[in-house]
Image (tube, rainbow, N blue to C red):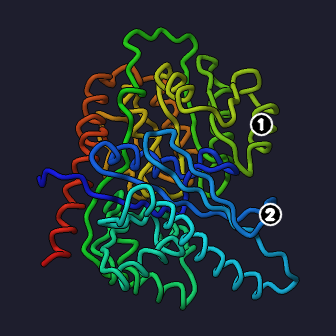
Amino acid sequence: MIDYNLNILFLPKWYPNKFEPFDGNFIENHAIAVSKKCNLGVIFIHSDHEITTNFSLTKIEKHGFPEYHVYYKRPTFGVGFLNQAISFFRYRKAQLIGYNAYLKDIGKPDLCHVHINGKSALLANFLKTTEKIPFLITEHWSGYTKESGAFKGYFRKKFYQYTAKQSSGITCVSSYLKEAITSHNIAAEFSIIPNVVDTDLFQITPEKSNQPIRIVHISNLSKTPKNIHLIVEALNHVGSKRNDFEIDIIGTGPDEQFMIDELEKGSMKNRYTFHGEIELSNVANILTNADFLLLYSQFETQSVVMIEAFACGVPVLVSGVGGIPEYMSEERGILVQPNSTKELEKGLVKMLDGYKKFNQQKLRQYAIQNFGVKQIQEQFISLYHKIKLDART
């Protein structure tokens, strides 16, 4: 590897911010991982109805690298098309405001790293055209998948196709996501680099003697795509037949009150703990003390909480959808058929009876070798240098 640090500019669509402090934290994890080997800066843009000026720039350095959060005043005209047009131009200007701050602190970037195609790629396209600065795209978005169906619009698709063609490549967190992207005639040089887990934070608790058995569920609590309604139904049904388990629920979402109401009405009343949205250190503490993780999504590109569970030596009970099967085996948990309460109930019973058979150390070693900071860091840094060298030739 070349022995000099590159100047890298992250341009994420999602990123933890003052409105949503945990939004896109998996992108933040990627940023933290690569920041040890490059000069990194992050520009994140978000609308804000509270600011009195058209733009507001905040610089944050909580992880040792600058994050430029630029908020633009959300237009409130009566005409929807006019609001969209003004928002577009304000977003574009907000990126330039952030870029000028980045230039003063770090200097000209060697490469831009876009996280999720779309508006976040506007600056990258501009710098590629005007200054020949290459850019890389990393995709996490499930909207490309047929199960989601969120990727719509002729002009939107054309822009994404153009941006992909202009890029020096696209990394995806799973082969499943790559196939979903290419199904929309988006062409690029693809590579698979999964999400990263902090294996120093997510650790094993060697001796657990939970009585009752502790399950943990972590998600943005929704019927779509997280199947909260099926999870609650299965828990209440299995819970009516056996009383040897409880569940910790972490997260917030549109259907959290529905979930709580249904648990209160059923057999799981007084057998669940709702934690809401909590700091990552608290998530790690709850997860490492769990006996298994329960997820039952309709679709997933690659689950971050699943690999965090592996790092804690905790097996998982998950639906066999999307990119999940690529990272699963009989040594790591149980895959169940999706979207069926009966299948989930069978999986619950099987895991409740057999969770002790999974080897904690093997689970953790798999996480370290495949999703650890050093491994993901090396993959990205090697790719950065390759792109930079290719741009020179």
Q: Residue at x 68, y 29 (%)?
A: 275
Mark closest to the chain's N terminus, 2 or 1: 2
- Residue marked by disc 1: 260
* Quadrant of the drawing holding the C terminus: bottom left
Q: Position of residue 83 (x, y in %)?
A: 76, 81
Q: Is residue 340 above or below residue 364?
A: below
SS for callout 1: helix
Quarter-wise, where is residue 333 in the image?
top left
Decide if residue 337 is on the left or right side of residue 38: right
Q: Quadrant of residue 323?
A: bottom left
Residue at x-position 35% and y-position 44%: 33
Residue type, numbered disc 1:
Ile
Task: Tell which tag, 2 or 1, sits nearer the viewer.
Answer: 2
The answer to whether residue 312 is above or below residue 76 is: above
Residue for badge 2: 49
**Residue 318 percent coordinates (x, y):** 46, 43
**Residue 107 visible in the current orientation:** yes
Q: Is residue 266 left or right of residue 104?
A: right
Is residue 336 among the parts visible in the rendering? no
